[in-house]
Amino acid sequence: MPMLLLTAANCDYVKRKLRRALPHVGSAHLTEALANALGFRTHAALRPHLTPSRSTRPQLAAVDIDRLGQRLLELGERMVATDSLPGILHSDDIPDRIWCAYRQGDRVANNYWFRACQDRNIPNIYIQEYGALADLHWDCWSIDPDDEAHVRDSRGDTLMRELFRCYQGFVKGADPGKSEFFGSGFVGSIERLSPAVARQIADAYFWRLYTPMRQQAAA
């Protein structure tokens, strides 16, 4: 599933884009349906979990696209196409992105994204696209050394095996470029993916690299 950091800016952005994609749906209904897609029964239940700024480490939520449409039906809206939501969640314009995609060789984008990850103390996950294929990269050079315990020593080995199993699950039956996995929990890459699969893996990898950092901060 696509992932979204629960910041007020992100949720406002997604709702604004959904209103443009679904102009016939009422604003209040979209608000409630989006909260449902994020795993909350109501928007009131979601609101306390929204981080107003980057001063604290935001919660990460999986976005269940089917739940968005189901909740709209329950609220009396007619059947709507919700296939615009993944593109909204993966947009370069989303305020608090969890990974970045750009053309291979774009050093400006590469340097900008690394600095942004460093400033936010999040893992550096990025996709480099070329032709019909894409390479996925990740590293933890961008995070504070105090937050690296989960990518070092035995925990890092366990994480690497988890990342590899995750990769295998995504590419099974959808691997036109004969992709290859390299690296560890701390730094690595997957070469020759389709861009769509690269985006799915980027979401899943951010969850695995970021969640232990948030748990440690909350401890």
Image (spheres, grey):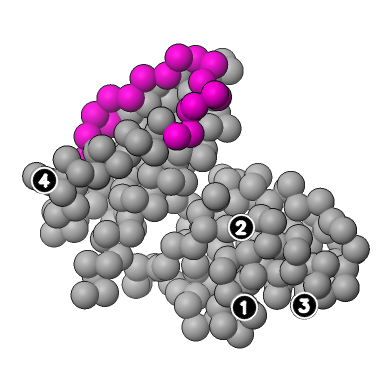
Indicate left or right for 60 with 16 as reference: left
At mark 4, the secondary structure is helix
Indicate which label's residue lies in the foreground, 1 or 3.
Answer: 1
Instruction: Please state the extent of the stretch shown in magenta in the rendering.
Output: 169-188
Answer with mark 4 or mark 3, whichever residue precedes in sequence: 3
In the rendered image, residue 32 lying in the magenta stretch gets the answer no
Label 4: few (<14), some or many (≥20) within 10 Å? few
Answer with mark 1 or mark 3, whichever residue precedes in sequence: 3
Indicate which label's residue lies in the foreground, 3 or 2.
Answer: 2
Residue 205, image quadrant: top left
Residue 44, image quadrant: bottom right
- Distance from the alpha carbon under mark 4 to that under mark 3: 48 Å
Query: Looking at numbered disc 4 in the image, what kind of residue is underneath it?
Result: Ser
> Are discs 1 and 3 less than 8 Å apart at CB?
no
Q: Position of residue 81 (x, y in %)?
A: 81, 51
> Are discs 2 and 1 less than 8 Å apart at CB?
no
Q: Position of residue 7 (x, y in %)?
A: 50, 68
Q: Which residue is mark 4?
A: 154
- Distance from the alpha carbon under mark 1 to that under mark 3: 14 Å
